Amino acid sequence: MVKILRVNMASLECTFQDVPEQYAGLGGRGLTSLIVSKEVKPTCTPLGPHNKLVFAPGLLGGTNCANANRISVGCKSPLTGGIKEANSGGQPGGHLAKMGIHALVIEDIAPEGRWYQLELTGDSARLVPSTVAGLNNYAAVAKLAGEYGPDKSYITIGRAGEFKLTAASIAFTDRELRPTRHAGRGGVGAVMGSKGLKAIIVDPGQAKGVPVKDKEAFAAASKRFTKALTTHPVTSQGLTLYGTAVLVNILHEAGGLPTFNFSQGRFDDHEAVSGEMLNQLTTERGGEGSVSHGCMTGCIMRCSGIFPDKKGKFMGKWPEYETLWAFGPNSGINDIEMIVRYDTVCDDVGVDTIDVGAAMAVFMEAGILKFGDAQGALDLMDEISKGSAIGRVLGCGAATVGRVYGVRRVPVVKGQSLPAYDPRAVKGQGVTYATTPMGADHTAGYAVTANILSVGGTVDPLSAAGQVELSRNLQIATAAVDTCGLCLFVAFAVLDIPDALAAIVDMLNARYGLSLTVGDVPGVGKLVLEAEIDFNRRAGITSAADRLPDFFLDEPFPPHNKVFDLTDDELDSVLKW
Amino acid sequence: MVKILRVNMASLECTFQDVPEQYAGLGGRGLTSLIVSKEVKPTCTPLGPHNKLVFAPGLLGGTNCANANRISVGCKSPLTGGIKEANSGGQPGGHLAKMGIHALVIEDIAPEGRWYQLELTGDSARLVPSTVAGLNNYAAVAKLAGEYGPDKSYITIGRAGEFKLTAASIAFTDRELRPTRHAGRGGVGAVMGSKGLKAIIVDPGQAKGVPVKDKEAFAAASKRFTKALTTHPVTSQGLTLYGTAVLVNILHEAGGLPTFNFSQGRFDDHEAVSGEMLNQLTTERGGEGSVSHGCMTGCIMRCSGIFPDKKGKFMGKWPEYETLWAFGPNSGINDIEMIVRYDTVCDDVGVDTIDVGAAMAVFMEAGILKFGDAQGALDLMDEISKGSAIGRVLGCGAATVGRVYGVRRVPVVKGQSLPAYDPRAVKGQGVTYATTPMGADHTAGYAVTANILSVGGTVDPLSAAGQVELSRNLQIATAAVDTCGLCLFVAFAVLDIPDALAAIVDMLNARYGLSLTVGDVPGVGKLVLEAEIDFNRRAGITSAADRLPDFFLDEPFPPHNKVFDLTDDELDSVLKW
């Protein structure tokens, strides 16, 4: 009873359909990217009726597999003009999978100014006028939870999505009904806003789990996979104790922590904004804080800590490493509590912390705000929800701030901001930023593994040698991981412990009655990437867009004083096979 | 003694060089586009050191040929991301030609915050700290004229150029030292600003005219050309009496006058904002007003009237048709004096009236301002010079307003706004908007001629038939006209009076000692277009960008209720030969 649900925002019709042959065997990013590539007019106006917004849990979603309940969101991006997949933790991914909803496809647009919410169960779907239009995510979810109950999960946009800002995110509730998990990148929230869809109420009802062809084999493979995750030091200790922010001190040490809008690779006050500091303050303060917290059912890495204020009250989730970096070192701000506040504003208004954080540093580069002005940054963040001109500019992300303020050093590729690893000091990451069809995205091929962490081998981060192959292999593997609905962080274990990948393949075989081998995995990744690249080419995005901004090629980056020196030909070879 | 002058804004060096072989025989747009195509890194950051800003008079500049003193400005556009040529009337084009300066190439960038002005004579050039930084164009030119004298001409940017806004223009003084002539489109003023170049003082000194190989033949051909211009009703009467605004009533009548952000093709109050009204008010009020005014030496069409206020004092130049349209019908405003004021703000702060006018209508579409709110529009215009967030957004043009305010109906191609002829009711114009390498630009292939005016034949404006060939031929011819430095309006005579083109060719032969024929002209146009398209391809702009926004294909346009229905294949055939 696996279905695709199509929701037409103009006619208000909701239609369940069988999964067409052309989409068989795909889930998560594989499914969103194939649907977008095959069904969306590549040159369409991203905020118009010809774009589609696709939600899809992964192939292992809804099972007992650890960390497999991510949800992918796909569309043509209003930020990059190309194809977009952004994925998120939280509860809705697992719920949709259990409900047998393979993909939810939002089509056409509602009349301007009308807001709807989608009530969704396993076998029914209904659009009704939204009761939460005009509210930000925390208030919207609280109101919806009051109306629909705490046993549901919620997908919402905040004011940024209503304003259709190009850095607007889509929020997914975690297990405590907090809208802290986001499909952040590429303006997917703006596309949801353009369609007039304010919220989705996901009611898993009595759904107990997905059908598994060979339960015994699945359980055995699942156990092996769990063992790998609980064995590897990154997935069992580093992430659990310090969150992704474990990376602050590591990247500082490596000289790859972009500071003052990508001007240098180390930040004097790095310890003040580190994962170790999150752990220390959370432990000291106790109360509602939590060092080890899972963002979704089935998570065993538990990296999404909860940050308490001085009185022990919930203040926000632990900011991710990229959030701490963007508002911290890259904006010259060393106050971790303020960064938690920016992060909470991002969660509430619904924007990508990376692009808006990077935008803050571009404001500072433009001289509108001083580097390190923590209160000024908070005041500016508060403008987003007001819908003021400056708030909207900020909420559109770094590229728009750069354009409006005439800034030359704008760290974006395909219009999307670079995250927290400087491409001159972590060159494999630079290759991924330049070449992924998504616009600069660290998760698309996370070369920090071999460049910095010596996971899955070691490749000198300061040299061009080996980076093309590293990024290529990671991009292929990641497209497959994203298709399964697995949290990307399983990659740490997969790269170092050979049985982890075998266990994933065995779970896929047991779940669907297949006979895949480990050797089949790259083919899945390539299929997905080829669909994405094909869409981008038809949308007018060529290899000329697979380039970093000039200043990464021109300005040596302290302390190592390297420039990004991969040639155009090398970059053009990355996604060819 | 024809030279290329290269000015390096980092080293402050000015170097005269002989014209290299690869640029021989070209001028105006032909020369700017070849230099940009051959010397500028196509993927460079437009506001960075790798872009170049090129000024070039045309092949017939500085001669006694009528209407031949236009100046071309080329660069990689920060608005479109592709190659840009914008040309202007005014005095500097003729002056540079007489001074033997074939092209002026501004290279690299000055340190952030430093402003220079270039003092230029026929054989010397010197960069000095600018005395007019922070001033808008009228004040800047007045101050410079006080310092350097009235016998010079001046090239300046206003605050918009200093802010590096993507609709910033470059101003060229007319014969009365007013900065009313602009290279308006594509953000060329932002590129000048990015280089730290605030002004150019052009001192023609004793330069008497350019060397002509065969003076007698030139004089004879020039006389024939003048006769054609003084014979054709458009160039001898329509433009002279009513300016380009003669088109308001004509386009209204044709149902092709975009009104309320391209929602309908007629405007009830069209007469109130027409060329006839400019003529009437100017005639009634007298004083400093002038119905017949030439913007540059050698102009015999004299379309650039001067508008007096109620007391007869200079209030502004006659707004062009596209300016009247953008702030008038397209913004629902029927007050011609207010439109003159917006136009004067544009001239002063230095922005493209088309893109900023179209942006005003997009603000209205977004609901930030009501259609028809003339005072609100003026208040918003005044924000540009202040550098407020909303002012900068407006000064970046329609695409940025659309992005920041999440607007779906944004009338741009390649990021540049469509001008004053709806592509659904003047379909040849739509073909030009979609396919010219410049981004939507009516002047690149002015199909209004055959579509509306029955000049150069007649092609039904409401049908797709014949538009591809019409636009192709006009784009080729225009590239040649722009290479000669001729005012585009000579095309009216050229299209209807065969001897006009022969006379142009005879003048080229007499000037340079060549033996071109009329049959050689298309080859020049194609050469220029090929260089432009080649640059765009390397910059990452493909045929997928040769498309109109969805709403022109989706929404029938009253009163004719047509949609734009040229196929993608038809559009892709336009610039192939």
Image: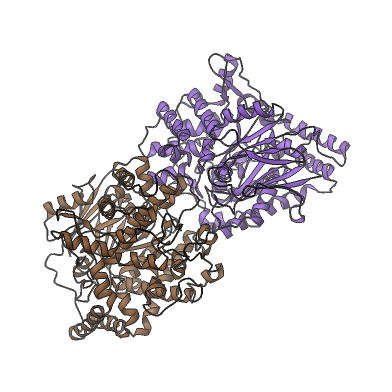
Chain colours: A brown, B purple
Q: Quadrant of residue A5?
A: bottom left
Q: Residue B368 appears at what percent x and percent y?
A: 36, 36
Q: B497 left or right of A412? A: right
Residue that appears at 25% across and 47% down? A115
x, y (%) of residue B429?
Answer: 56, 44
Instruction: Report if residue B318 is visible in the image.
Output: yes
Q: Quadrant of the N terminus of chain B?
A: top right
Residue B408 rendering spot, x and y as whole percentages: 39, 46
Residue appearing at x 44%, y 36% in the figure: B360
Residue B263 in view here: no
* Quadrant where the C terminus of chain B is found in the figure: bottom right
Between residues B64 and B351, which one lies in front from this camera angle? Answer: B351
Q: Is residue B212 left or right of residue A540?
A: right
Q: Position of residue B372 (x, y in %)?
A: 41, 29
Q: Depth check: give the residue in front, B226 or A497.
A: A497
> Is A101 left or right of B217, judged from the image as shown?
left
Q: How many marks?
A: 0
- Please give left or right for residue B220 compared with residue A42 in the image: right
Q: Is residue B70 above or below residue B522?
A: above
The residue lying furthest to the front in this view is: A268
